[in-house]
Amino acid sequence: MAPFPFLTTACVALISGGVAVAGAPAAWRVPRRGPGVDQGRPSVYPPGRPNVGALIVIFLAGLVGAGAVTARVGWRSALAGLLVAVVGGIWLAVVDLRVRRLPAVAVLMITAAAGVLLGLAACVDGEKARLLAVVAGAVGMRLAYRVNQAVVGGMGAGDLRMAYLLGGVGGWAGWPGWMAAAVLPFALSALAGGLLLVLGHRRRNEPVPFGPAIVIGMIAALLVADQ
């Protein structure tokens, strides 16, 4: 693995931020529906087209997320798949914040694209063990989320689907990365839920969008990845 020079890393981060912004209008077109949606509560962002403030936040999320991952991972075949996971995950997080759901088709497409790219990278680099780790991590995270849903509850179908993406990236990152991906989203979600409740922006027992916490956990997993 060769580290990226600063200028190259900055370019990758800027392009990723631009891609995230380019996908924002599509996120605003995802309808708010489903049996788990509370129609009496507004979404974080208003319907229609994204405003300038939202676009800036999305750009910065793509910039910082992709930049941090690129700086940590460096130049390797898997970088393309990891960036697809990060930028695609940011798009899903925006949708989840707006409409309180993760579209099944979008989750499947992003997960499949990232998985195929990571699989091809593992084959090109001769890292069969890493390929197995991606598959095992994805399946293991899905099972962990299933168990959590059965015991605790409160997770949506989209969260369960996104477990494959989170676990696959965590598996690529190695055991410490997988553990970070498994634990951090729940800790962040609990912290955000408690804070929103104290500030009066959330009612008791009202679910907190889990997509953003999943994406942060995924990025954190890559920051502690085995090199």
Image: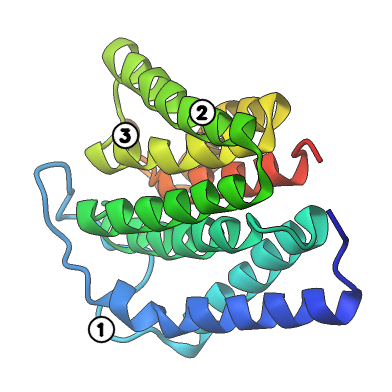
Please name which of the two marks, 3 or 2, marks the residue nearer to the observer.
Answer: 2
Please give the residue where the numbered disc 2 appears in the rendered image: 137
Quadrant where the C terminus is found in the figure:
top right
The residue at the point 56 percent across, 84 percent down is 18
Answer yes or no: is residue 200 visible.
yes
Please name which of the two marks, 1 or 3, marks the residue nearer to the observer.
Answer: 3
Q: Which mark is residue 160?
A: 3
**Which quarter of the picture shows residue 177?**
top right
Q: Amino acid at mark 3?
A: Leu
Within-10-Å neighbours for mark 3: few <14, some 14–19, many 20+: some
Front residue (pair 193, 185): 185
In this image, 56 relative to 94: left or right?
right
Q: How many marks?
A: 3
The residue at the point 52 percent across, 65 percent down is 87
User: CA gap, disc 1 to disc 3?
Assistant: 28 Å
In this image, 6 relative to 168: left or right?
right
Please name which of the two marks, 2 or 1, marks the residue nearer to the observer.
Answer: 2
**Which quarter of the picture shows residue 3?**
bottom right
Q: Amino acid at mark 2?
A: Gly
Front residue (pair 158, 56): 158
Within-10-Å neighbours for mark 2: few <14, some 14–19, many 20+: many
In this image, 223 relative to 162: left or right?
right
Answer yes or no: is residue 193 visible.
no
Assign a secondary structure to mark 2. Answer: helix
Earlier sequence position, callout 1 versus callout 3: 1
Q: Position of residue 74 (x, y in %)?
A: 80, 60
Please give the residue where the numbered disc 1 appears in the rendered image: 48
Q: Amino acid at mark 1?
A: Gly
Front residue (pair 193, 19): 19
